[in-house]
Image (cartoon, rainbow, N blue to C red):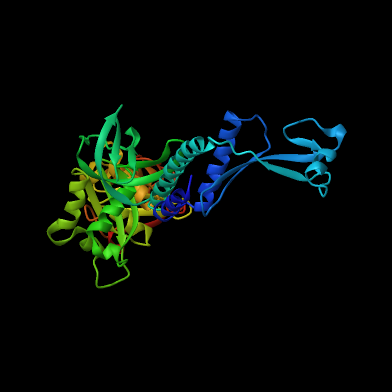
């Protein structure tokens, strides 16, 4: 090696961010192994690279011991032998003798090249890991590179992201060379380099897409409070603003629905319900069950549960196909929600001996309400107000 090599190392330090000292230390360690493999079995070898000229020196190191302690002729010498070299040596001193082979330059150059290539690869992997680990929770646009065993590999710039089967959306088709937006879910270090795990089904993808489309969300004027999603089918999103002049739902929908439609298009026509967030649980539950209409909401603060009475003709809509609407509403609110029809509730009231309950669909002058915190069917035993429920009806809004 020579001065040109040192200049090349310094250039690498600037371009790749690899420390010059760290790289030279790594080359020195590799050269020690190369020397032992080709010239000596001694373990007491040191290699020094001049950081200015690039010159290499190999030193055999021996420890001064007593005659009785000599066990390794390559690594130890007696005090008398040391005094023949220099009378000032004493027990325990380390004596170094330059033993650089004449043809060691060729081996050194080959070894140094291998170390440099390896360190460059490690540095690039480290840079990729640092870049993408700092971007967890963001979305990127990538190109489908290949598909293997249903796992989709996506080119996202400096890395190849992995879209596993579990993070794909049922019904979506991915073709090689097609472009799509993906959510960076996780980044892990492996022996093959950093692995970037992507998702198309994560609720965060919907949130980030709205941030791209809605300036009010990007600027912090409108806040996405909660999202519940069943990828490929439906998403519910609750938004909030403290600015009285801004309609949070309208901002997300956009003029003639252009903003929400852009998100729907990216999600291949997934349905999106947007509601206004409320700190009042009864209002939040009512909105979350949209598009179904409600008659009354019984809130149990202690158990974080709500029983909702809906008109008979709204029962199927409130529950949704296979329970999807009420399931998403419960996730959105963080409350357990039970749905009961007007007839089920009224029948249970009559059998339990309570005054018949009427809503706008019956007699609005009757204020007696009750129901139980359970699934679909009403227990006849107790009035919900006796069970800790607070009752809200349409007149409370």
Instruction: Please say whether residue 295 is visible from this viewpoint.
Output: no
- Relative to 395, 133 lies left or right: right
- Residue sitting nearer the eye, 320 or 349: 320
Quarter placement of the C terminus = bottom left
Query: Residue 177, can we see it?
Result: yes
Residue farthest to the top? Answer: 149
The residue at 19%/58% (across/down) is 253
Residue shown at 70% from the left, 40% from the top: 61
Compared to residue 176, the image places residue 88 above or below, namely below
Residue 228 in percent (x, y) is at 33, 48
Query: Toward the viewer: 375 or 185?
Result: 185
Residue 143, quarter of picture: top left
Q: In which quarter of the image is residue 246?
A: bottom left
Count all numbered tags in the image, as a single digit: 0
Q: Position of residue 342 (x, y in %)?
A: 27, 46
Q: Where is residue 95 in the image (x, y as percent from the top left)?
A: 74, 44
Where is residue 362? Give x, y as percent.
23, 53
The single residue placed furthest to the left in the displayed view is 256
Measuring 37% from the left and 40% from the top, which residue is drawn there? 375
Q: Which of 196 and 181 is in front in this view?
A: 196
């Amino acid at each position: 090696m020579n001065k040109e090599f040192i200049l090349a190392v310094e250039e690498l330090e600037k371009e790749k961010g690899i420390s010059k000292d760290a790289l030279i230390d790594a080359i020195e360690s590799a050269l020690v192994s190369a020397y032992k493999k080709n010239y000596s079995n001694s373990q007491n070898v040191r290699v020094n690279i001049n950081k200015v000229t690039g010159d290499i020196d190999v030193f055999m190191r021996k420890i001064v011991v007593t005659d009785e302690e000599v066990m390794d002729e390559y690594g130890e010498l007696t005090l008398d032998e040391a005094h023949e070299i220099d009378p000032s040596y004493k027990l325990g001193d380390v004596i170094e003798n330059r033993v650089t082979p004449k043809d060691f330059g060729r081996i050194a150059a080959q070894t140094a090249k291998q170390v440099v290539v390896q360190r460059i690869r490690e540095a690039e992997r480290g840079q990729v890991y640092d870049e993408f680990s700092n971007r967890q929770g963001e979305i990127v646009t990538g190109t489908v590179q290949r598909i293997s065993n249903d796992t989709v590999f996506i080119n996202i710039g400096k890395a190849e992201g992995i879209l596993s089967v579990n993070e794909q959306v049922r019904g979506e088709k991915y073709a090689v060379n097609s472009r799509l937006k993906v959510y960076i879910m996780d980044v892990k270090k492996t022996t093959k380099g950093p692995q970037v795990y992507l998702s198309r089904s994560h609720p965060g993808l919907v949130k980030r897409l709205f941030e791209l489309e809605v300036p009010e969300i990007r600027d912090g004027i409108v806040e996405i409070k909660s999202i519940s999603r069943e990828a490929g089918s439906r998403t519910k999103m609750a938004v909030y603003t403290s600015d009285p002049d801004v309609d949070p739902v309208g901002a997300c929908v956009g003029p003639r629905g252009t903003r929400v439609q852009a998100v729907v298009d990216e999600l291949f026509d997934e349905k999106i319900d947007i509601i206004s967030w409320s700190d009042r649980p009864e209002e939040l539950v009512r909105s979350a069950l949209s598009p179904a209409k409600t008659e009354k909401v019984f809130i149990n603060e202690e158990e974080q549960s709500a029983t909702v009475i809906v008109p008979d003709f709204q029962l199927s809509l409130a529950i949704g196909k296979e329970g999807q609407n009420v399931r998403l509403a419960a996730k959105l609110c963080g409350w357990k929600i039970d749905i009961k029809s007007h007839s089920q509730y009224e029948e249970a009231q009559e059998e339990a001996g309570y005054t018949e309950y009427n809503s706008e669909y019956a007699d609005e002058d009757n204020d007696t309400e009750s129901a139980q915190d359970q699934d679909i069917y009403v227990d006849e035993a107790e009035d919900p107000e006796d069970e800790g429920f607070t009752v809200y009806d349409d007149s409370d809004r």
